[in-house]
Image (cartoon, rainbow, N blue to C red):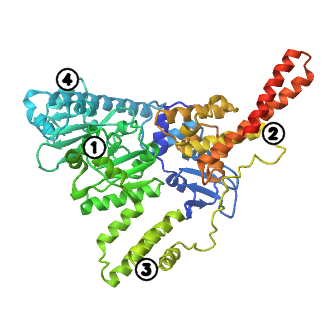
Amino acid sequence: MFVKYPEELIEEIRMNNDILDVVGEYVKLEKKGKNYFGLCPFHREKTPSFSVDNTKQMYHCFGCGKGGSVIQFVMDAENLDYIEAIKLLAEKARITLPEGESEEEKKRALKTQEIIKINTDAARFYYEQLNDKKNLDARDYLQKRKVSEGVIKKFGLGYSSNEWNLLYSFLKSKNYSDEDLISSGLILAKKSGDGYFDRFRGRVMFPIFDLRGNVIGFGGRVLDDSLPKYMNSPETLVYNKRRNLYALNFAKNSGEKRIIVVEGYMDVISLYQFGIINTVASLGTALTESQGRILKKYAEEIIISYDADTAGQAATMRGLNLLDDIGCNVKVLLIPKGKDPDEFIKANGADAFKKLVDNALSLVEYKIKVLKSQIDTTAIDGKISFLNKAADILSKIDNSVEQEMYIKKISQEYDISQESMFAEVIKRVKPKGNYKPAIKIDSTKIKPVGNKTKSDENNLVHYERIILSLLSIDNSLYRKIEDRINLEFFTLEENRKAAEIIFTKIKDKKGIVPAELLNLVSNESANNFASMIQGECNFEDNLRAILDIIKKIEVIKLDKRQKEILNMISSSGNKEDVDRLKEELKSILIQKKSM
């Protein structure tokens, strides 16, 4: 695969083009079970066999076999090459590519670079202002909030003076044009048209970084309780509050399997100061789907910690539902006495906060808890209403064991038979129409490709692809098998190159998801991988499955070498060579026996 643009940028473009939205422009989709189905746009059919998995951000046609990520879909649907598809999707997501062939693209790229330079110079200016003796009020504020000097430097905190155009004058001295300064969002034009002034004044400044470490925007907080307490940069060519998260550039490298989402910049900074660096904040908005997909990429578990007031509770529920819909494992961290994370950790310390994290409620537990707080269950009518609404919640649980445990718990707590509660839940999950449940795949029966006439080489390639697919589905598997496989383990060059990128991403704690894997291989291979991920790789126990496949590969390689040795022994006239080959053969037989 030819890659012109940075890998991180391609992934950013993919994540900001939801496959349901893009495919929905070409195909009428209907939800059946977890996935969406429609008539395949790539071959004629009367019965829908074209499937879109919103959780994995993939498509696959069970009729013609085509499949892949949103990039492959656009390539096939519009008959574009890889780079052309990237450009089209970048334009849809309003993401500027670093290079462009047209004059318009080049101008846009130059303007983007200029705004990043302006933001970087502004961040340095604000930092210097914070250290200026005439701005002691800002220093006093941060000292009262117990922010250390090291954290001030780490997050690049600064201060915007109360003067009307101090930043403007500084940036003009750097020879920036008024047009670019206005485009940065940091400078505003007077309504009278006779001058310019600073957007941020009299505020502690919080630079906002993207994943590549560029300053893309700012948040500013007043030193008192005047309103608006917080002010953020407006949308610009480089800053989109719906597609970024504060401090994710730090949290993604924390080494933790979970990320905590809080509301404010100071919550993030206080937790970081206490050693909890796997924390991010949404940028003045409710969580968006784009933010959710980014979080899913970098964490196996996402914990939301918003204010306990009514508005915070509603925001938490919206965030939970959004994250759950895109396949995230989400929980809710509840802080006692209505405190925010900043207040709690300063009063109680890191260990106490970590206990709260460990005891975070699951999505179902939180919904039941909120339901209890809204309904008076002392009266019969209230109890009936609660149990019916609880049944609505439980009916949405996919895992039957988890569902049964909650049914049992609620039945005991409210003195109702498990059978009655189970019956109410089942009513709500009964399949409609002619919908047929998906076939369950037996994880212990991993079959070779095709029939017995297929060569060992084809089976090896097939098994290698299953390993890569499983690693992209469950990154944690790599640590459990890294002593069993390396790059030389893969026989197909394309698989070896994909493995190298996957291994590196996981080691660097960047993570990889199935849709990314599809962009590492050719279009033909992407179809095969999509088919595997959607069907063959639905194992009940991924670790057991991947270990079984590794064993099968090892057996095939040993069998192949055994045949080679037997042929060499029969044709060799050199006694020393024969003796050496016999020793190797003996070793192979011992290895196979021990498997």
What distance separates the C-alpha of mark 4 from that of mark 1? 45 Å
- Residue 351 x/y as whole percent: 29, 45
- Circles 3 and 2, Cβ within 8 Å, touching? The answer is no
Mark number displayed over residue 350: 1
Q: Amino acid at mark 4?
A: Ser
What residue is drawn where x is 68% and y is 52%? 444
Lower sequence index among marks 2 and 4: 4
Q: Secondary structure at mark 4?
A: helix
- Residue 164 x/y as whole percent: 11, 36
Residue 168 seen in the current view? yes
Lower sequence index among marks 1 and 2: 1
Q: Amino acid at mark 2?
A: Ser
**Mark 3 — residue?**
416
**Mark 4 — residue?**
173
Lower sequence index among marks 4 and 1: 4
Lower sequence index among marks 3 and 2: 3
Lower sequence index among marks 3 and 4: 4
- Disc 2 residue crowd, few under 14, some 14–19, many 20+, Cα 10 Å: few
